Every structure is written in C-alpha cells, then in structure tokens.
C-alpha cells in the first residue's frame, strides 16, 4: 500500500522533527555570521526573511488561508509576523557582537521559564538552579564587554518566548494549516523589516554569490526549522516542547565550533552540561 507524504510525515515521531529544527536553528545563523563582512547585519536579516517568504509564497500560497480566516485569527498571524521580524533582527544584531553559543544560552532563558511555569516541586527548584548556573557559566564572564550585545540577546529571548506561544497556537490548527499560517506570518514579517533592512541587503542583491548565500541562510534558518517546529508543535504540548529546547545551547556550541571555529572553554562546556541536566531533571506537574 502506497504511503503519501502526509501519512509518512505523521508516522515520524515529533521528537525527530524537533531534532531537525534544533540543528538548523543555529546552522543558518552560523552561515549568516560569515556574510556580515560583506552585507549589513539588518541586510542579512532581510535576506533571511525575504527568501523564506518567497519560498512559502511559491510553496503554500498562504494568502488563500488568510482570506478564509476570521479577523481574530488574522490578528494572531499579524502578531506572529511582527514577532518573527523583530526577533530575527535582534538575533542577528546579537550574534554580530557575541559568540553564537552565548546568544543561544541567553535565548534559552525564555524556554526555561516556560518549562518551569507553575511548578513548585523541590525537584524543579533544583532544575532551575542548575539551568541558571549553566547560563551564568556561559554568559556571566562576558556581560561587561558587550552590554549592547547582551541587551539584544535578552530582547531576542523575550521574542523567542512569544514565538513559541504564538507558533504553538497556530500549530494546533493542524500541520497543513499551521504551515500555511506560518507562511502568511512570514510575508507579514517581510513587510515589517523591509523599511529597515532592504538598503543593507542591496550589496547582496547585485552579487549572485552573496544573494545565493542569503537565500541559503533563509532556507536553513526560517524555512526548515520553522516548518519542523510546526510539525512537532502540532503533536507536542507547549511544556514538552519547551523542555526539548534544552538541546539548543548544545547545538549552538557545536555549530559554533564546526562552522565558526568558536572553540568553547571548559566553563562553556560545564555551562552547557548544567543547562541540559537542569532541564532533564525537571518534571512536568500533573494538572
């Protein structure tokens, strides 16, 4: 019996989709760092969002979903579009100033808060302490040197939490509807970032090599991970998804080593270990 793409996708465990998202979540930005020498930071952010919006427009034609939605649902997509635009701009400005692993660790503070929201057990108190200690080891010795970078990373963290909350709500429409909603939000994000990012992207627009690199960043950063997020979120609770995000700091550090040659220190490795162990120790409380 022949199995269609949708059936094959549903047979894969949601954790497999999350693992794909975790790898590409920082792989694309790692390549984006390499573009900063030739293209303005906000220009790279524009290329990422524009190329992703073009892919979603050609693949999903999300305006058809938009026309069928109520105004309440449209406001949800507008909110996600605004979050995607500002979050990506803050993220790129942060990684232009700080190591990728450091930004990844700060970004992870938000998922820690989501994962531990409303829990009061001693075990989860230990989990919070371990994770907080890990983040301090990864970031505490660098806070004085790049205050703007840290502030931008913290802003990115806040918007990442909003992304999780909004994207999870959209995913509950079902995998297909969720991806179409994501595509519509990406088109709205493009409208938001164009006034501040298009001018910085012009050097890439006139260079086929840089333009191709920018498109690759968009596919690796905003198409593959966000689509696999939707496929995972459609079948995972928000709390479980937040717990799985414990893999992100380790992924950031590994990709920083492989792509950017940002070799972690012993303190970095200890910090990553503490963050991961802290979330592994955490247990969701019965409702």
Image (cartoon, rainbow, N blue to C red):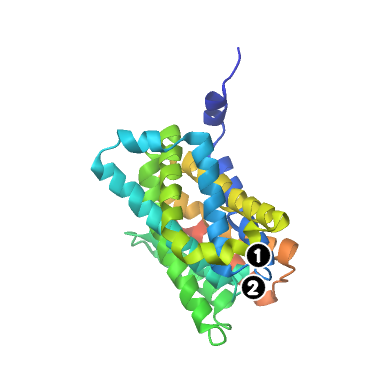
- Expressed as whole percent of the image width and height from the top left, the position of residue 224 reads 58, 45
Identify the secondary structure beneath mark 1: helix
Question: In what element is the residue under mark 2?
Answer: helix
Nearer-N-terminus badge (1/2): 1
Name the residue located 73 percent from the left edge and 62 percent from the top edge.
259
> Which quadrant of the view contains residue 207?
bottom right
Q: Residue at x 52, y 26 (%)?
A: 6
Screen quadrant of the N terminus? top right
160 over 232 or under it: above or below: below
Quarter location, residue 275? bottom right
Q: Relative to the observer, which residue lies in front, 285 or 7? A: 7
**Extreme residue toward the top, this view:** 1
Q: Give neighbour class at mark 2: few <14, some 14-19, many 20+ (Cα, 10 Å).
A: many
Q: Nearer the viewer, mark 1 or mark 2?
A: 1
In the rendered image, which residue does mark 1 sit on? 253
Q: Is residue 276 left or right of residue 63?
A: right
Q: Are marks 1 and 2 in contact (CB under 8 Å)?
A: yes
Q: Which residue is mark 2?
A: 268
- Say which of 248 and 281 sits in front: 248
The outermost residue toward the left is 71
Label 1, label 2: how far apart the Cα atoms are: 8 Å
């Amino acid at each position: 019996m022949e199995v269609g793409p949708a059936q094959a996708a549903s047979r894969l465990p949601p954790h497999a989709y999350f693992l794909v998202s975790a790898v590409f979540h920082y792989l694309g930005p790692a390549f984006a760092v390499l573009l900063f020498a030739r293209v303005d930071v906000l220009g790279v952010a524009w290329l990422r969002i524009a190329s992703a919006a073009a892919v979603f427009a050609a693949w999903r034609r999300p305006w058809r979903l938009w026309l069928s939605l109520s105004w309440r649902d449209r406001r949800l997509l507008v909110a996600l579009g605004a979050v995607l635009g500002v979050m990506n701009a803050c993220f790129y400005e942060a990684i232009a100033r700080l190591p990728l692993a450091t930004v990844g660790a700060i970004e992870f503070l938000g998922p820690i808060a989501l994962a531990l929201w409303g829990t009061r057990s001693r075990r989860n108190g230990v989990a919070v302490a371990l994770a907080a200690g890990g983040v301090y080891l990864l970031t505490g010795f660098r806070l004085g040197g790049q205050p703007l970078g840290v502030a931008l990373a913290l802003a990115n963290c806040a918007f990442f939490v909003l992304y999780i909350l909004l994207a999870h709500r959209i995913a509950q429409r079902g995998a297909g509807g969720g991806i179409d909603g994501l595509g519509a939000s990406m088109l709205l994000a493009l409208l938001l970032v164009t006034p501040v990012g298009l001018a910085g992207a012009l050097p890439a627009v006139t260079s086929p090599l840089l333009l191709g690199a920018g498109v690759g960043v968009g596919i690796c950063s905003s198409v593959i991970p966000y689509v696999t997020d939707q496929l995972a979120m459609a079948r995972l609770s928000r709390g479980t998804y937040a717990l799985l995000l414990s893999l992100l700091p380790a992924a950031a550090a590994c990709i920083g080593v492989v792509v950017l040659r940002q070799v972690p220190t012993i303190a970095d490795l200890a910090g990553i270990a503490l963050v991961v162990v802290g979330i592994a120790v955490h247990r969701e409380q019965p409702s």
